[in-house]
Every structure is written in C-alpha cells, then in structure tokens.
Image: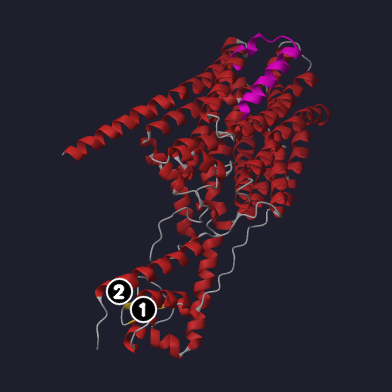
Amino acid sequence: MAHEPVKNRIKKNMVVENCRKSEIDKEDEGITPPDGGWGWVIVFASFMIHVITDGVTYSFGLFYIAFLDYFEEGKGKTSWIASLLVGITYCSGPISSSFVNKYGCRTVTIAGTILASTSLLASVFAQNILTLYFTIGIGTGIGFGLIYLPAIVSVTCYFEKYRSLATGIAVCGSGLGTLVFAPLTGLLITTYGWRGATLIISALVLNCIILGVLIRPLEAPKKDISLQSLHFKENGSIVKVAGENERKALQAAGGKDRNKSNERQVKYTAVKMEDDVGNNLRAALSQPILLTKSLGHHTQTMTRSYGSSIMNRRDIFYQGSLDNVRAKSGSLENSVENVRMHSSLRSLPNGNTKHSDNYESPSNAEENVDIFCEMLEFSLLKDPVFVLFTLSNFCTSIGFNVPYVYLAAQAEERGIPAEDASWLLGIIGIANTLGRIILGYISDKTWINRLIVYNSCLTICGIATGFSSLCTTFTAFAFYSVVFGVTAGAYVGLTSVILVDLLGLDRLTNAFGLLLLFQGLASLLGPPIAGWLHDGLGSYDPGFWVAGSMIAISGLMLFFIPVLQRYLRKKAEKSQRISVVF
C-alpha cells in the first residue's frame, strides 16, 4: 500500500484542526445580545428596581432622625442601622453572584425581594436598636444585595453595542428613587410614625417581585449536533467521524488521487479529544438508539452548562459599550494592557479565548464556587495599580454615605424645617441622575481621559462636603446637594469603566468583587464615625470634615496612577533586558 507523504499528512491534520477550532469558536460565541427587543423591558425593570431599592436606602437618613427621637440612643449607635444596610448590600455581591450563576436573575431577584420586604415588616415590631440591626441592617441589606446585582447583570446580558445607553437609563432610577422616596418617607413618618412608614415601604418593596418576573432569561440558541461531527471511543483511542466540511477541506489539501485506504483515514480522523458520547464506534454505528440517547444527554449537558454560566462572562459588570473599549485600546496595540483587552472583548460564556480540546461540562456547584472564589481572589492585590485604586475606593466609601445619613439632621440643627430638610436628599437624587448622564456621555468620548474626569469629580465632591459645614440656609444646602449629587455620579457610574481602563476587561469580575467587599467594609465605618464625633463634640460638622477629607484624598491619590504605571513599565522593561542578557 502506498504511503502518503508526511508533508501532506501534516497539512491535512492542520486543516482538520482549523476546521474543528472554527466549529468550537462558533459554539463558544454563545448568545448574541439582541441590543433591543425584550431588552428594553429589562431596562425598565432594572430602572424601577433602582428607584425602589436605592430610594429606600438613600432616604434612610430620615428614619435615622425618627429612631433618634424614639429610642433615645447615641447618634453613633443609631447610625449603625443605615451603615449595616449599605455595607451588607455591598458585601453580599459575591454571594449574589453565585446565586445568579446557579438560579438565574429572575429567581434571585424574587427571593431577595421577599427577604427584604419580610425583614422590613419584622422591623415594625422592633423594641430596641439591636433588633433593627438584624432586621433592617442585615436582613434588608442581604435582600437588597440579591436584588441589586441581577438588576445590573440582566441589562448587560441583553446589550452590547448600546450597553452604555441601556445601563445609563437603568441606574438613573437611583437618582429618581431618592427624589421620590425622600419627601415620601418624610411624609409617611410625619403621618403614620416610623412603624407605619416602615410597613408601607415594606409593601412597596414587594413590587420588585413583579419587576423580577419581567427579567426573562436570554435563551441560548439550540445546537443541531450532526452525527458526522461526533467523537467516539474505540479501544481506548479517540476517533472522530469527520463532518462534510472537513472532508471537503481534506480533499482540497490532499489532492484528488486518493486510494480507498486514504479515504477511510480521512473519514475516521484521530484527534486528541475526550468525549463520553457512545461506548465505542461500532456500538454507536450499529445501534442508533444508543447514539440517540448519548446525543440527547450531551445536548442537555451543553444547554444546562451554557444557561447557568451568566456570571462567567468577563464583561458582565462592564456598564459601557464594548465598542468604546476597542476604540480606546486602539492606540495601545503594542502594550500588554491592549493585548489583555483584545483577548477578552467578546462576550464568551466563560470569558476565555483559549479552547480546550476536552469538552467538559462543570457541575453547577463547581461553577458557583468558581465565580465566588474568582470575585474574592486576593491575588489581584499584588497589582500596585489595583491596590491604589482599592485604597481610593475604600476612602471614598467611608465618606460617601455620610451626607445621605446626616445631611437632613445637620440642616435641622441649622433651624431648617424638617419638611424642607427632607427635600435636600431629593435634590441630591436628581443631581446624581443628571451627573451620571452627563459624565457617562463625556466619558464615552475616545478623546477624553476618563481617569482625570473620575479623579477631578471625587476631589471636588470631597472639598464641597468638607465646606458644607458653612451652610446655614436652605439655598446653601441645596447648592451643596447639587454639587455632591453631580460629582458623586462619577463614583457610582464610572467605577467599572475605570477598572477596565486600568486592568483590562478580563480581570473585571475579580476586581469588581474585591471592590464590593472593601466598599462594604468602608460603608460600615463612615456613618458611625460621624455619629461618634457628634456624640463627643456636639456637632455634625466634624463628621462632614472627615467625610470630605476622605473623599478628596481618594480623588487626589488617583492622580498618581499614571506615574505608577510609567514606573512599573520601566521596571518591567529593565527586567526584560536583564533576562535577555543573561
């Protein structure tokens, strides 16, 4: 029997491998975001969820005043209720992610709504501050954490090209919620007392169940697996029945003059691949029923794995347009950062461009553990740039919630009526909405340095917060509320975008998970520190000085990131030159 030249065999094997990789690539591209359709219903649901959850959270400073009067506890002790509510909401992010990965956005949203509403209802019967720590602080905090994350994730799944617009609309519900709930909460407390107001707000939170039902999962396309592309085991070796495209490619590569032996070799091409479809080739071909059962199991496994891997997408927390990531990385084509960005731009289910020859469907438990561990993978803290950014976020979070908790109380100390003071939080809300829209639009421009915008806003926000102690009239407090609301929009809206600019899209999930953890811990500290300062010094001013200083410092320190990046780049180049010499 004539032997085929080695060169031709190598060429044919390369063609087979390229065809196989092409098929895998097509499978891994996964669901293409529709960028519209039912996605706009998802945006509406997410918008209303932000209206309710953030509206309740950011107007909680009015409950703080009511709790002070009713329980007659210290200001630091009373402020722990709001601190726990915000801190637990942030810290529950990784847990919420693992639940979303296993049960989906709809189920997690509904479960979180029931938990949050039930916890608020239980608060109506509280007889002391300690009880409110558990009901409002921990119970409602975990519930809001379970609601909040799916509201963002569901939008990013449905949009890619118009993601910046869609997420921008969704998160604007936060500002509108503060505008609506601040005066509403004040009115309810005045009319029904804090217990009656809590009961009504508990009922309002239940509306998130309806909104959760609207979050329809994005269906994976059904795969038509041809019998010609299956892989079987025969005598311990892996044998693939070549598909029609592969046979044509092999014919083109190997020429027309091929004997029957070579044709059999083409048809049954050995590849290094593991698959449990069928026990062996002869059994599968001679008993179609076995092949059908195996194929059905294989298809179900693929569908289950694909549908439950929502949190494994590298861009799941990215709120901007992926086109902007490509555009901004265009001028960095020779840098490591650009390679890292381009390697993860596609919305792959597993976020990985490297394909294994083995198809192995991980169990749900393994996936949940993986996403939880990935979000809390502390090895990223070895990156000096990320450490500096995390420290900045920690400082920002210490001061960020102080105005939401104490601004109304500070205004009342200045002699402003309680009805007017409650509107200050509403002004912050509408200004925050405008700030997110304006800053989001500006930061999408390729010629804008988003880091400079982010740093400048934090610095201005901190300085304004520190000088808010000079306000004595409603007009002055309203002006501060506008400045704080607009500049704080950068902190909320641009964090994920800045993370991608600094670290690359592939590390966003890990970085975002760690940031949520540190933001949650810092949020636990801010309001109590300001409350303790008031207990000791008799004024809210020192608390606002500390909060303003923390926010301003957090912005100023980020101006050193470009300097740090240049230092690290030179250090890496020097190390590379030394390694080349030796």
For the point 25% across and 37% down, the residue is 576
Kind of element beneath mark 2: helix
Kind of element beneath mark 1: loop
Using the image as rendered, state which of residue 483 and residue 518 is in the foreground: 483
Residue 188 appears in the rendering: yes
For the point 63% across and 52% down, the residue is 158
Where residue 31 sits: x, y (%)?
58, 59
Look at mark 2 in the image and give the residue it sits on. 8
- Residue 474 belongs to magenta span: yes
Mark 2 vs mark 1, CA separation in Å: 9 Å
Look at mark 1 in the image and give the residue it sits on. 255
Q: Which of the 4 image quarters holds residue 383?
A: top left
Choose the circle earlier in sequence order: 2 or 1: 2
- Residue 496 belongs to magenta span: no
Contact flag, marks 2 and 1 (Cβ < 8 Å): yes
Crowd class of label 2 (few under 14; some 14 to 19; many from 20; radius 10 Å)? some
Q: Amino acid at mark 1?
A: Gly
Where residue 318 sits: x, y (%)?
55, 43
Using the image as rendered, state which of residue 520 and residue 9 is in the foreground: 9
Q: Which of the 4 image quarters holds residue 118?
A: top right
How many numbered dots are placed on residues in this image? 2
Where residue 335 sits: x, y (%)?
39, 39
The answer to whether 248 is drawn above or below residue 497 in the figure is below
The answer to whether 177 is drawn above or below residue 422 in the figure is below
Q: Amino acid at mark 2?
A: Asn
Residue 531 appears in the rendering: no
Which residue lies most toward the left here?
Answer: 582
The span picked out in magenta is 465-489
